[in-house]
Image (spheres, rainbow, N blue to C red):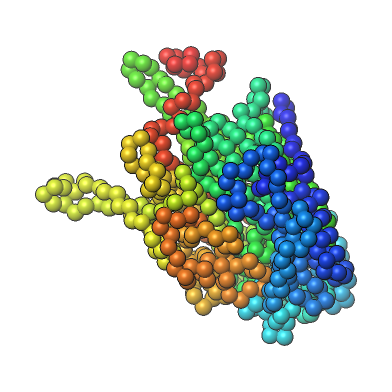
Amino acid sequence: MGQSTGRTEWSAAVRHPLDPLTAAELRQAADILRREKDMSERWRFASIELKEPVKEALRGFAPEDPIAREAVLVCWNREDGQAYRSVVSLTEGRVVSWEHCPGEQPNITVDEFHECDEALREDPRVAEALAVRGITNLDRVLFDTWAYGASLISEEYRGMRVGWADVWYRTAEDSNPYANPVNGLHFVVDLNRMELLEVEDDFTVEKPQIMGEYLPKHVPSLVQRDLKPLEITQPEGTSFILDGHELRWQKWSMRLGFNYREGLVLYCVGYEDGGRVRKIAHRMSFAEMVVPYRDPNLDHYRRTAFDIGEWGLGFMTTSLELGCDCLGEISYLDATLHDSRGDPYTIKNAVCIHEEDDAVLWKHVDEVAGAEVRRSRRLVVSFHATVANYEYLAYWRFYQDGNIECEVRATGIMVTSHFPEGEQPPYGDLVDERTYAPFHQHFLVARLDLDVDGQHNTVYMSESEALPVGPDNPHGLALVQRNTPLRTEEEGKQDYDWHTQRSWKVVNDDAKNGLGTPVGYKLVPGGCFPAMLDPSSPVSERAGVIGHNLWVTPYREDERWPCGEFVNQSAADSGLAEWTKENRSIEKADVVLWYVFGLHHITRPEDWPIMPVDTVSFWLKPVGFFDRNPALDVPPTANGHCHTPGAGAS
Ligand SMILES: [Cu+2]
């Protein structure tokens, strides 16, 4: 294949304060707490992550400096359900802080998902309810446990750690369970005692004849089309250097991190210009995902997933496979996480790093000089997460002209319901015989801690305005650009406006380019859509963040989770909606942008039985950050690869 892999073990020695926790550190963190707090087997760890040093502590860090390491742990006692948040010093081997979090439910762990499955499988009430529906082979049943909001949990179970489970059925051993919903049957489970609290047996639907399979062997009369091989080779190797967790490519440099909740984190993103590295972002990641299903049906009304806050994008990250997920000369990074007992494990090939050809970067054909063309090449850092039926593929791309693109692809299997003969589903589209997929929305929140040439940044709303016809504008052509500074958090709550082609510029008014104008980077919106939710809806109350496309806050170390730290079973938002009530100044500040984008998923037959990727993205583009096109120095394609007559490189 001409492909190779270079793998860096993430459990290698810590060389930088932002390196993720190693397997040994994860184990040590859990051990310290278990010992100091005399924890029984009934205690569980919901999360263990690096306590990242604040920006001030990072400034001036030199490789020979000693590195003090701390971890943040969230744990709870299954006996009484009480949750605690703790900071431990790994360097000193002691507990730094121990904080009781009354009434909070930490994220659901993968272990609980499996334990809940086992508990349901063994409960005779489950077998009985399934037998009534003609399902007797429990090996073919999939129980999918979901978290839900406090206001939808019955009064009698309030305060308990509960999940509700869906039921799906495989018609063959390895066929698609999501092809066969067992409608009208749900289970409510106490996740601390792993006890079935309630069987909700509401209705049954006669099963239609459908084709919900995607594995070729299960798709009847499938004739696969012809396709010749396409191979990507870089005989002289790649142009990027991965040194520990530091990644350098062309003029870009950054550090890579990974944690249970955000998955991949990009730190210290900079661009070399005029002999120095100019900072663009301190930290970029996905901080929350909110997926409300817009169908009041009993099968779907609780289905509002917070895939990052409830489950963790890191925990849901899957291994990538060369030639399938990533094509070409690939470097992979493994990720090290932990289970609910604090034991570390590795996700092999969790992050993919590679270069891609990206067609033309710039070109001109001159009558005298001929054609001058440059190929665009981009560096892609990506990871994939599978959250039950859905997959999210995240790509951060860096370009030679200073652009950064953040793309998310959604694929996987849609949730469906069957409906009786003669009915029409009002809140979803028909995708198969008597089968509909409910409408839903995937809101992603990108947390962008930008530092454009430093920390004193102001965000400007940038809009075009057409001036009215008048003596100075007789033909009605005049177009001006208005840049309005956002001075407070209230002004920082922004929505996209098609009529003015609104975008947002992060400007450093103190740093000027060679033309004398302030340097900046522009957030070019994409994938924006309104929430379309009544303010009284439980989703609105738990996820205020989806009420706007952009929020801007001044950097605070502890403000990381836009819907609050504890999202599982939350009743109200304790994140952005709460912090911004202070209406702090965001002018000439160390600003953090929270960009809300995603998919307004109006389902269609073509998304069934497996959905071809739906793709959304936004861009960060330099605006006056450079004095001119920074990609003038990209060399022509090497001799022998460019065949245009008259081209400079021929
Ligand atoms: Cu969708």
Q: Single out the residue that lies furthest toward the bottom.
A: 156
Q: Nearer the viewer, residue 613 or 215?
A: 613
Q: Is residue 75 left or right of residue 603?
A: right
Q: Nearer the viewer, residue 96 or 341?
A: 96
Residue 225 location in percent, x, y?
66, 37
Q: How many marks?
A: 0
- Can I make out residue 207 in this image? no
Image quarter where the N terminus lies is top right
Q: Which of 122 and 20 is in front in this view?
A: 20
Q: Is residue 436 left or right of residue 505?
A: right
- Can I make out residue 451 in this image? yes
Q: Residue at x 69, y 77 (%)?
A: 102
Q: Residue at x 38, y 54 (%)?
A: 460
Q: Where 76 falls versus 89 (above or below)?
A: below
Residue 495 location in percent, x, y?
42, 61
Q: Residue at x 73, y 63 (%)?
A: 96
Q: Is residue 259 left or right of residue 196?
A: left
Residue 276 location in percent, x, y?
50, 34
Q: Where 368 falls versus 460 (above or below)?
A: above
Q: Residue at x 77, y 70 (%)?
A: 76
Q: Where 516 falls versus 81 (above or below)?
A: above
Residue 615 location in percent, x, y?
55, 49
Q: Which of 203 and 474 is in front in this view?
A: 474
